Image: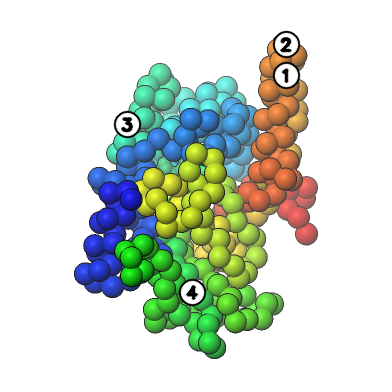
Amino acid sequence: MTPLYRRIAAQIEATGPISVAEYMALCLFDPDHGYYTTREPFGADGDFVTAPEISQMFGELVAVWLVTAWRSIGAPLPVTVAEVGPGRGTLMRDIVRAVRRIAPDWQDGAAFALVEASPRLAAIQRLTLKNAGVSLSWHDDLDTLPDTPLLIVGNELLDALPFRQFAFQDGVWSERAIGLEEDGKLRFVLKPGAFDLSLLPSAQPVEEGSVFEISPARSAFMQRVCERLAEHGGAGIFFDYGHLCTGFGDTFQAVRRHVYEDVLQNPGEADLTSHVDFAVLDRIARACGLATSTATQGDFLFGMGIIERAGRLGATEGAEQREAIRAAVERLVGPDMMGTLFKVLMIAPRGTGTLPPAPWVQP
Ligand code: SAH
């Protein structure tokens, strides 16, 4: 039993079952035992590997998108380039390096900002970026970002924000919550709970046992980002695993040491996530008067020229390194790897031409 397990069990004993959202917030961000506050999640020695950790090409192509977006909104300066949930800081490091080459006109007018909820990870990001040679600032919330046009990025951030689950059983919707077995083990229970039924997918029938997920935290985050973009100008790009159409299903998952495990087994010691419903976030951006475009990560990276970039990178390398670059491309865009499961949501002001249509956008 992890220390957090005992704390959560004691809390449930005292006050009753806790929602999936409460459980997730405790597991990921408890100051003493939370996953992001105390552990090293990333890389081969950690629990999972993210796109920027696979290859510098990911950050370079994101940088190309950001600079293209910036030019098409009239190249405003000053501009703030922000990343939310930067993990080890690898994506930001690659973005900074790339924009110094492709957008030298940012030299004096661009400030780079990192929005990070975990003080431990913010310290690691400072180390990664210590020689970046650009203006950098750290924020624990979006509120303190400068009021300039904003270019904002997030990779595998949204999946880490808490979500709620509802189950349709015996003809009614109830909230899935975490309670206790007789022997003190954590287990899923149902408790009364309501949500806005208009959010349900219209094309799929509700069946006995259907599970439906909502994430008010994700929606609130997207609303705040989009209000900023609408007010101050700018563009945003968010990558995550998830679906482009709302659907049913239990997508709560725990990953530890690159292996899936029971979400209730090791609270605080496994990464907890759920799939992102991009349809909901897309609607929020549009309601703020912004234009959006969605694509799979594979289509996005192909469209941005990952094959050409890989060719350039490999041109001066030996056979072994060329094979490593090829394998990285395969991981990022392969349909059975990250290419299809991962999606991207691009947000920009209407009519700016920052959101190229085909071949990115699947019909
Ligand atoms: N983007 C990185 C890390 C993804 S892991 C990569 O691709 O490698 C999720 C990151 O989001 C972690 O840095 C975590 O601490 C951060 N995070 C989670 N919730 C957050 C929130 N509400 N605000 C800011 N950062 C958050």
Residue under label 2, please give it.
Answer: 318
Q: Earlier in the sequence, mark 3 or mark 1?
A: 3
Answer whether labels 2 and 1 touch (C-beta < 8 Å). yes
Q: Which mark is residue 246?
A: none
Horizontal relation, residue 1 to residue 356: left or right: left
Residue under label 4, please give it.
Answer: 166
Structural distance between the alpha carbons of marks 2 and 4: 53 Å
Vertical position of residue 321 compared to residue 109: above or below: above
Horizontal relation, residue 47 to residue 3: left or right: right
Q: Earlier in the sequence, mark 2 or mark 3?
A: 3
Residue under label 3, please give it.
Answer: 123
Q: Residue at x 29, y 46 (%)?
A: 33
Residue 46 on image: x %, y %: 47, 34
Q: Is mark 1 within 8 Å of ligand 1?
A: no
Tell me which amino acid carries mark 1.
Arg
Residue farthest bottom in this picture: 171
Nearer to me, 265 or 205: 265
Residue under label 1, please give it.
Answer: 322
Nearer to me, 272 or 148: 272
Q: Residue at x 43, y 22 (%)?
A: 132
Answer whether labels 2 and 4 touch (C-beta < 8 Å). no
